[in-house]
Amino acid sequence: MDRTHLPFDGARPSYDAAVDVRDQTEPLPTRPLAQAPAGAPNVLLVLLDDMGFGASSAFGGPCRMPVAEQLADDGLRYSRFHTTALCSPTRAALMTGRNHHSVGMGTVVEISTGLPGYDATRPLSAGTLAQTLSYNGYATGAFGKWHQTPSWEQTAAGPFDRWPTREGFDRFYGFLGGEASQFEPTLVEGTTFVDPPRTAEEGYHLSEDLVDRAIGWVRDVRTHAPDKPWFCYLPFGATHAPFQVPEGWAERYRGEFAHGWDRQREITLERQKALGIVPEDAELAPWTPGVPHWEEISDADREVGERLMELYAAFAEHTDAQVGRLVEALRESGELDNTLVLYILGDNGASAEGGIEGTLNETLRLNGIGDDTARIATQLDTLGTPESYAHYPVGWAVAMDTPYQWTKQVASHYGGTRNGLVVHWPAGIDARGEVRHQWHHVVDVLPTLLEAAGVPVPETVDGVEQQPLDGVSFRYSFNDAGAPERHVTQYFEMFGNRGIYHHGWTAVAKHKTPWETARTGTPSLAEDRWELYDTRTDWTQARDLAGEDPQRLADLQELFLAEARRNHVLPMDDQLARRFDAKTAGRPAPPRAIRLLPGAGRLREDAVPSLKNTSFAIRATFTSDAETVGVLVAQGGGFGGWSLYVKDGRPTYAYNFGAVTVTHVRSSAPLTPGDHVVEVLFAYDGGGLGLGGEVRLVVDGEKVGEGRVERTLPFFFSMDQTLDVGLDRGTPVTDDYGRAARGFAFTGRLREVLIEAGDDALQPTDEQLLKAALVTH
């Protein structure tokens, strides 16, 4: 089998065949099959989301994660493992072994652009880990967060080339976006959108569901192919916001964070020294600028901060417990010894996207809208439940990145890029409970796993010549703690935050602050101040040497630019507000108008007209009687969105502004039985982002209601919930029908929904609109 050119063509060798099988003396060759090398290990790759280096107890943190600890005690901890500082880029680098910009993933898919390093489109010359293992005889399954498929391709029309099952996985069950409700996620099985198997009231939780599916898949593979190795990719949505846990978990850490985030850093650093994952002389990096110290905030702020951190810790522990269920299933089946487990504790540093105060609803923060502790304090009893979409304050993110400075998104500093890695493989690693200090990066995972499996990096995949790997295998370090490190140069960049590592030195420039919103301006890149650190003696980037060694700093800056040019990093782009709009960003824009038929749904925001920062019209054509109720069309959910529905015979439009206010515009009179056209006509104020507008509700050409929405969400309604016709999937937009209605499905006969964005949508008269609708239907 030629493993350098994939897939294996399976061609039979030449042979001579007799005319009559009775005369065949030499055996005929059977078709050769792609098979893994003898003894190749199973591979379990677990990836947690938004967990900082100093969060897990396995790396000295306060979140109890006994499974991570047990695997580390029986295997290895890697103390200098790095990610890209953000979700999609880390995942793309993990799957391809190439730097994130070089495979088009310089940012998350939702704000991609048309530039080569940022278009969210993996080139075919960067074949994936799953493709290589699959073509080499592995069964492959992925269960969890994907976040690599362009959002405008996440419809029934595809294309499906960048969905998991076209990128090398035999089986996929999870979600495609950047985050998901743990209770009401938008799930995909293969290439089909599906509903969760149970409701939250029936005990559903996404992390538990993913592990159930992974355990079942491994069991099925082993049943039908006893000798076939498998690759299981398990990227949890946890511990990304929303922080949501099953009943009984939220109270597990009550009172354990009263000492605050400053003291927590000190506690964590001492534990890290005891574990040997930082040197005895390691210092706490300087406090992150702009973040208040614990003693500087009010008693109310401290109470809210404590409760949010308690919730995060419970979320982390619960996730670890699910990993434990899978590990125990492997142990019981006898497969754990020859399963190479990589447990990556975070795809980036801890998230500061909850803002200085923290929030009940992360959607607010990502729309550039602040929350306040007074509001949060009134709803503390909802934390962790389906009624909240919580995220902790920035101070806790800084503490969870101990001993480093800065957080997720800040690719310049180790607080954004250094994550814990646990490696466990009893059959392949002799060492137990040791620490490895070699410097490595997420691009190194692919070559490491291929080397462990005994297969080469392919030269061609599906007939396409492959671009060189950027990663370096760290298999050499498994049984040699003192081996010289092999990954000696690595650039970093995210939103203008940038850095370069080279033979122990780092030159870094922090540019954008994560909790400053997309509408907050940033200085030009030329104004940034570069820092210089010798991390051979200054493990934590605590002592800036830029003033003492300007020539070395200049050399490293030049090296950064060379790497940036080589990997399509340039031009760097920090203009987030512009990138939320597909047209100005340069990615495929959503349609200006769309006609949706009954049954349409689970549509991401890039797949339908954008109703943000603009006027628009929504028109639903249907037949009803006196008993008809239900949702005609809804977008988003209980933490941001809108819904058009019929209740008590009256058409109603609800606009949910980040779960802070919900505006209802209702018909003044109930519908009569028969055919109807109901319209929502929204006239945007104009002149800026997130402003208000006037709402007219029209039935069969006659205005039946009007009102005003004072503020609107400028960038998106939800990173998870979708647009649906005929019901409101997931969290309900309004409590007017609420969760008990189970989607509040429309009981009449719905014919179509028309959605049109832009001022032109309001130009035709109501009579003309009605006539056009009646002619059509």
Image (cartoon, grey):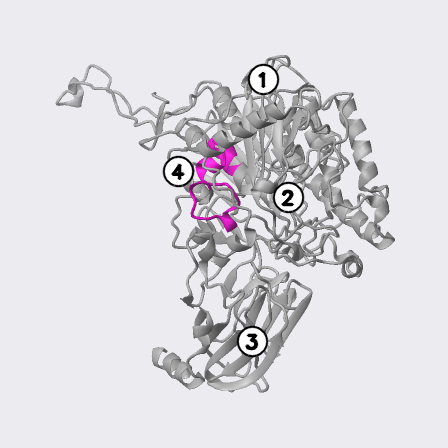
Query: Residue 269 occupies which quadrant of the picture?
Result: top right
Query: Whole-Å distance between the Cαs marked 3 and 4?
Result: 48 Å
> In the depicted view, which residue is nearer to us: 162 or 45?
162
Q: Which residues are magenta?
A: 91-117
Residue drawn at the location 67% of the way across and 49% of the way down:
515
Q: Are marks 4 and 1 in contact (CB under 8 Å)?
A: no
Q: Position of residue 525 (x, y in %)?
A: 57, 42
Q: Is residue 96 magenta?
A: yes
Vertical placement of 697 versus 365: above or below? below
Vertical placement of 437 versus 114: above or below? above
Q: Secondary structure at mark 2?
A: loop
Q: Which residue is mark 3?
A: 629
Query: Whole-Å distance between the Cαs marked 4 and 1?
Result: 29 Å
Q: Which residue is mark 4?
A: 123
Q: Secondary structure at mark 4?
A: loop
Residue drawn at the location 70% of the way across and 40% of the way down:
316
- State which mark lies toward you, 2 or 3: 2
Q: Which mark is residue 238?
A: 2
Q: Which mark is residue 485?
A: 1
Q: Earlier in the sequence, mark 1 or mark 3?
A: 1
Q: Earlier in the sequence, mark 2 or mark 3?
A: 2
Query: Whole-Å distance between the Cαs marked 2 and 3?
Result: 36 Å
Q: Say what amino acid the circle numbered 3 marks.
A: Val
Vertical placement of 604 versus 666: above or below? above
